[in-house]
Each structure stands twice: as C-alpha cells, then as structure tokens.
Amino acid sequence: FKPKGERDRFDLFAATPPLEALRFIVSLAASQEDREGDCDKIMLIDVKKAHLYGKCDDPKAFIELPLEDVSENNQDSVGKLNFWLYGMREAAQAWEEDYATKLKSIGLVRGVFAPTTFFCKGLQVRTVVHGDDFVLLGPGPPLQQVKRPMQTWHELPFPASLRPESGEQYPRTILLAVLASW
C-alpha cells in the first residue's frame, strides 16, 4: 500500500510497451510475402506466475507465516522473502529485471525507446513484453532457440504461434484473441 504522504517512487516503476510496438510486429508479419515457409512467425508466450520470479534483494523483507507453516520445533512465525509475492509493490520491477537479464544472456538487446522491446540481430528475432506476455517475431528455428531457454527459466503453459511449422499444434485462436484485446 502507498503510505500517506509518500511521493512518486521510481524504484517501483515497471515499463509497459507502447501499443505501436505490438502493431509494428503484427505489421511486419502481415506484410511479408509467403515464400514457401520462409516467412517469419509470431509466437506468443505467456509466463505462468511471472511476478513470483522477481528476486527479493531487500534485507528487511519478511512476511508472517501462516500457522500451518510454523513447525512445532520452530516457533518463528516470520520468514525472509527470497522472491517477491503478487501484490507487493516491488514485484513488477523485479520481474522486469529478471526477464531482461535472461533475454540479454541469450543475445537479445533491450530497446532504447521502449525497455520492454528486444531484438537479436543474429537470430532476427524481435520481442515485445507486456507484463507476463511475450510476443516474438522471427523465423521458426530461431524462435525455437529463444523459446527453449525460456522453458527452463519459467513455467510456460503453452506457446501459440501464427504460421506454425508442420506438425505443430498450437491454439492460434487464443493468440488472435489476445492480440485483438491487447
């Protein structure tokens, strides 16, 4: 909660992408000619429980444990947070730092104009992140190169893609609905 009299706190800010970033990705995908499977695909990745991945570096961040978690031998009813919880003000910014660091480790460079946009020149993959939703554009194999490490970092219920590879079974209607509402 924001304490009474507290001023704006930029240390709690988490960026959101401009709508134009998503429109740019969709426009790039739509304007390509269909060249026998060479076209870029759009892939949507929704990270499950995203804000719980942000590491808590605050040495004073403790929570009261529920009674069922307090053992008979240990009378402590307080626990030190290692990761932020949903609803905590610092969770969104910590999540942003987490995914940005991990995307950088696989070669994606953070955008200057919008810190929630990323590009990898070598893979030709563009990414826009809105909260826990990642919209990626690129050729099929490089998209898989980005998705594989993401599956080891985070819980991904399912990725959805437009222009799937042969044999891929993704719920594209969900992707279209999300893109339409975003």
Image (cartoon, grey):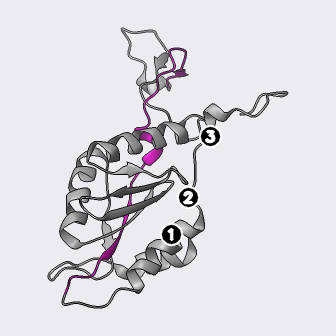
In the image, 162 versus 170, the foreground residue is 162
Q: Which amino acid does label 1 sit on?
A: Leu
Q: Mark 1 points at which residue?
A: 22
Residue at mark 2 to residue at mark 1: CA–CA distance: 8 Å
Circles 2, 1 touching at the beta carbon (< 8 Å):
yes
Q: Between 97 and 156, which is closer to the camera in this rendering?
A: 97
Q: In which quarter of the image is residue 4?
A: top right
Q: Residue 98: percent from the left, percent from the top?
A: 40, 39
Residue pictured at 32% horizontal, 60% vertical: 157
- For label 2, the SS is loop
Residue tagged 3: 13
Q: In this rendered view, identify the residue nearer to me: 33 or 172.
A: 33
CA separation in Å, label 2 and label 3: 13 Å
> Which quadrant of the figure has residue 171?
bottom left
* Residue 5 position within the rendered picture, expressed as x and y whole percent measured from the top left: 85, 27
Q: Which of marks 2 and 1 is nearer the N terminus?
A: 2
Q: Quadrant of the N terminus?
A: top right
Find the magenta span and give its range: 37-65
Q: Mark 2 points at which residue?
A: 17
* Residue positioned 25% across, 65% down in the render: 143
Residue at the (31%, 76%) spot, across then down: 41
Q: Distance between the residues labelled 1 and 3?
A: 21 Å
Q: Earlier in the sequence, mark 1 or mark 3?
A: 3
Most foreground residue, 166 or 71? 166
